[in-house]
Image: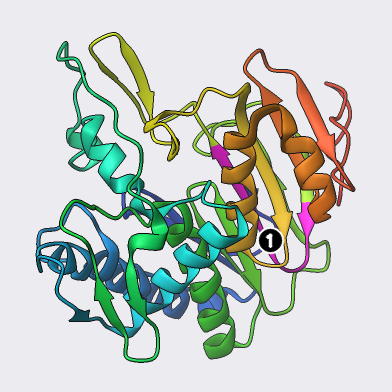
Amino acid sequence: MTVVVAPVAAESFPAIGTTATVVVTDRDALPLAVSLLRSDLDDLDRACSRFRPDSEVRTAERAGGRAVRVGGTLAAHLDAALRAAQLTDGLVDPTVGTCMIALGYDRDFAELTDSDAAVAAVPAPGWWRIGWDPTARTLVVPGDMRLDLGSTAKALAADLAADRIADHTGCGVLVGLGGDIAVAGPPPPDAWRVHVTDDHAAHGPGPIVAITSGGLATSGTTRRRWRRGDLECHHVVDPRTGLPAHRGWRTVTAAAGNCVDANIAATAALLLGPTAPAWLDQAGLPARLVTDDGTVRTIGSWPAEPAPTEPGHRR
């Protein structure tokens, strides 16, 4: 997804393996907004990164099944990840970190290379085996388990950062982390306009939607791809099989009351395959689904695709 910037101030920078963008309705607020977002993303990386040996989540994994007390940032992300697993009956499962390592995704994606070595995919150990006490903020990770909070972490970080920036500046703010977008504060007069495409880093075909609150999230299989032996891999893994999802959709974009809920819905829909439209419709979430051959299906109040010469639509 790409933000279609109106006459407001914006800045983008690389962070947590993606592109971070902050847009504000008051140009004078931009330096503070950027500083707050950078600080939040630094905290996220120290708490949740599975590629930093000194991150809190990696420290808990090395504890050999002993309880480890964690900080507030990791606690918030564990709450979100386990809530996602409950809401989706385990389709969005933070224990897919174990699967990712089996597929060779054991380092920052920028350092990942294709390999002729075959892999033996393993199902996720199961989110219910995580020992999490939110009151004491203690975490127990079984010895055979590796966590990956990526299915919810970027989206929750976007929500939290947008709210914090709006509170500090009093202006409208949009935070985008890759395909995850959250807005807070008073929106621009014409709303926040977002160009929805298969690739958040490119200007491809797709509608322009307008939002005034909540969030949008896109989950897809077109980016972060690599090869292991004869297996074409991507980063959306089915926890039931440990294999990359191949369920007929190449991207799903969903809108919800916040970015993390939109992201949960989009990721679950990718894994549900043919039953995803009915599931999204029952949940009352507007969505755009794109099949492997490029056919677009829209759910609920999501706008129809514009004709090639037709201006974007508003939601």
Q: Position of residue 92 (x, y in %)?
A: 50, 50
Q: Nearer the viewer, residue 295 or 308?
A: 295
- The answer to if 214 sits in the magenta stretch is yes
**Disc 1: which residue:** 7
**Which segment did they paint magenta?**
210-219
Residue at 64% from the left image edge and 68% from the top image edge: 183
Camera sees residue 277: yes
Residue 219's quadrant in the figure?
Answer: top right
Q: Main secondary structure of the magenta part?
A: strand
Rendering colour mode = rainbow
Task: Name above or below for residue 36 compared with residue 293.
Answer: below
Q: Is residue 295 left or right of residue 120?
A: right
Q: Nearer the viewer, residue 72 or 12?
A: 72
Task: Name above or below for residue 122 compared with residue 296.
Answer: below
Residue at 73% from the left image edge and 33% from the top image edge: 275
How crowded is the residue under tag 1: few (<14 C-alpha within 10 Å), some, or many (20+)?
A: few
Amino acid tagged 1? Pro
